[in-house]
Image: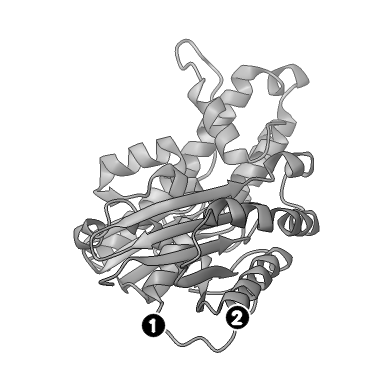
Amino acid sequence: MATKNFKILGIDTSCDDTCAALLEVNNRQVKILSNVVSSQVKLHQKYGGVYPFLAKREHQKNLSLVFRKAAKDVFDIDLIGVTSGPGLEPCLWQGINFAQNLSEKFEIPIVPVNHVEAHILANFIDGFPKSIKSIKFPVVCLVVSGGHTGLILMKDIGKYKLIGETRDDAAGECFDKVARILDLSYPGGPAIAAAAAKLQITNYKLQITLPRPMINQKNYDFSFSGLKTAVLYNYRTQPEKIRKSKKYVRAMCSETQQAVIDVLIRKTLKAARDYKVKSIILGGGVAANEELRKQFKKKAEVFVPSKVFCTDNAAMVALTAFFHRSDNFKSIKAESNLRI
């Protein structure tokens, strides 16, 4: 660990949030000096998802503003970390170009950051460095968001093996598509969770049963495209009066959410048993889902970041850059399909 106060600027433009954060790290703690997120959610709601070139344009407008708000009056930055992938390539380049300009202008070292690894290492922000000592390696990591659903075996920081991933839609992507079918708002995950929480079970006769794709297969892969299709077929068979009712929408949201949770938990626990790991950690925007967190904790001891560090943010990018500060990077380029 560092013996001095080490200041790291993090920048993330992997999708539709323009993020910048400033961390101060030493051998005793991580101090978050700022963590700024400029959201584009309202801008993309009419599309039911992120429109990449519109997101790129907004990043161009917002980066300088977000940086100034995050950096404040701090001029002694020791390191810059910037997300290089995976993500939307037009968006990634905005953050990379901005970070490289800062690096060259002020002669500050720069580190490219893997967005998936950053979601994993977000678990170490709270309670650093005790958090590192609490999480015993090897670890199974479930990273689950709008763009990613995968299981990663982590032997140490920087040592990863991808053991399972989605073969089609990510879990968060499935939520977005189901929300669109049900005429709910974007992003779909929070909208579905909110509707599911309002379902009243008492004297409610409407029964909806959805598949749990690949839940009993011996591998660690996922598939959520078929779940979305099952929702669509069920929705189309209902009379207009039923499918537009609050009861139907809430029941469908509850069953969709539970189907996703069942698969995520079953696959993760199987991987944990098979690999004889000592810890399970979660990361990604879907890990902010309250029902997922609650049900996971009933099944196993799991580590999960504070909700603010589950969704896209630059604090996790800055901390990941800190862990890789000694690595030798020759160049930085956007890699939309970067693997861990």
Residue at the spot of label 2: 332
The reply to whether residue 219 is visible in this rendering is: no
Which one is nearer the viewer's eye here, 57 or 338?
57
Q: Can you say which quadrant of the picture contains the N terminus?
A: bottom left
Residue 184 placement, left or right of 172: right
- Which element carries disc 2, helix, strand or loop? loop
Q: Quadrant of residue 57?
A: bottom right
Q: Residues within 10 Å of mark 2 (few under 14, many from 20)?
A: some
The label on residue 228 is none
Q: Residue at x 58, y 55 (%)?
A: 19
Q: Residue at x 46, y 88 (%)?
A: 328
Residue 147 in percent (x, y) is at 59, 57
Residue 17 in percent (x, y) is at 63, 52
Q: Give, as a three-letter code, the residue at label 2.
A: Ile
Residue at the spot of label 1: 326
Residue 191 in percent (x, y) is at 59, 33
Q: Residues within 10 Å of mark 1 (few under 14, many from 20)?
A: few
Q: Quadrant of residue 167?
A: bottom right
Q: Give, as a three-letter code, the residue at label 1.
A: Ser
